[in-house]
Amino acid sequence: MRNKVTVVGGGNVGASCAMNLASKELADVVLVDVMEGVPQGKGLDMLQSGPIEGYDVHITGANDYEATANSDVVVITAGLARKPGMSRDDLLFANYDVVKSVTEKVAEHSPNAILVLVTNPLDAMCWTAYKTSKFPKHRVIGMAGVLDTARFRTFIAAELHVSVENVTAVVLGGHGDTMVPIVRLSSVSGIPLTELMDQATLEKLVDRTRTGGAEIVKYLKTGSAYYAPSAAAVEMVESILKDKKKVLPCAALLEGEYGINGLFVGVPVKLGSKGIEKIYEIKLTGEEKAALQKSAGAVQELVDVIKTKMGA
């Protein structure tokens, strides 16, 4: 039996995600969106690319969740995208209602699915999906670190004029301006970054990584990034469906790790067929710990606002 992946949200991120899943032949894909005709039309268009691109999977578009039943993985991209001048945090109330509603329907039709959250503000939306679905913590995962790390790797490779394939980077923390790129553990073919560039250049790249999403929003004016975010989500889905056990930076529920409790924060995890199979706790310096705690504090503020809204 083929794997089945549902992508909720037929906008740029969701459609790109569905296309990537199909082109890699990872699963049959169901694309869901509230806009009548949009998922059906995009799904049919992708299906007709199969004979040309050489993939052979079924792609279905739907406005309800009947077609999503018994999905192995559900990628949630639904929600409003950022506009210029809008922080991820501004999206909180708008997207809380969307993610809560979507998660209720997903949990009803696919009670054994693994949830991959993409909607911003990411870490708070993971918490929302976790509380709403009542799924075990290893089956609710946030896509952020893979994207943030890819951005950091891109900027490092461009600065040094080397292949991105040789660049290894680590980014921890919440998906926002307080994320924590760990320069000490980032390298080019094992060569520490500190031996390849000066401190001022490193700080410039770290700052650009933190504002990587906002930089794209500024250019696009009426939308936000979607090629890299969708590629990041698909890498996670692939590791789950193929049980590859890749170690990737993802938003996971921490229960004491890194001194953080009850929050979704970006950390290195092992992704396999069960979802998150292991959380890796890196020994951090005092400065790195402080930065991670600050990032977790920013996530906590958002969760507290949601708790107030929920009356919890």
Image (cartoon, helix red, strand yellow):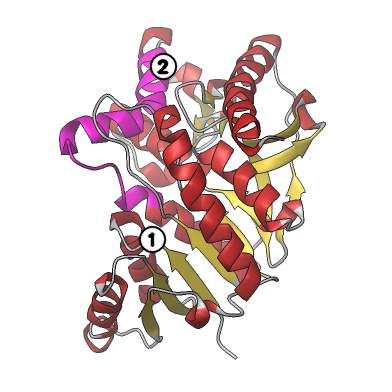
> Label 1 is placed on what type of residue?
Gly
Q: Which residue is mark 2?
A: 202
- Residue placed most toward the observer, 280 or 81: 81
- Residue placed most toward the observer, 7 or 285: 7
Q: Closer to the N terminus: mark 1 or mark 2? A: 1
Q: Quadrant of residue 293?
A: top right
Left or right: 261 with respect to 275?
A: right
Q: Which residues are magenta?
A: 201-229
Q: Which residue is mark 1?
A: 9
Left or right: 9 with respect to 194?
A: left
Q: Residue at x 51, y 21 (%)?
A: 178
Give above or below for 129 relative to 29.
above
Tell me the number on the disc at residue 99. none
Q: Principal SS element in the magenta part? A: helix
Q: Give residue 136's position: percent from left, percent from top.
A: 77, 56
- Residue placed most toward the observer, 53 or 40: 40
Q: Quadrant of residue 126?
A: top right
Residue that lies at the very extreme toward the front in this rendered image: 311
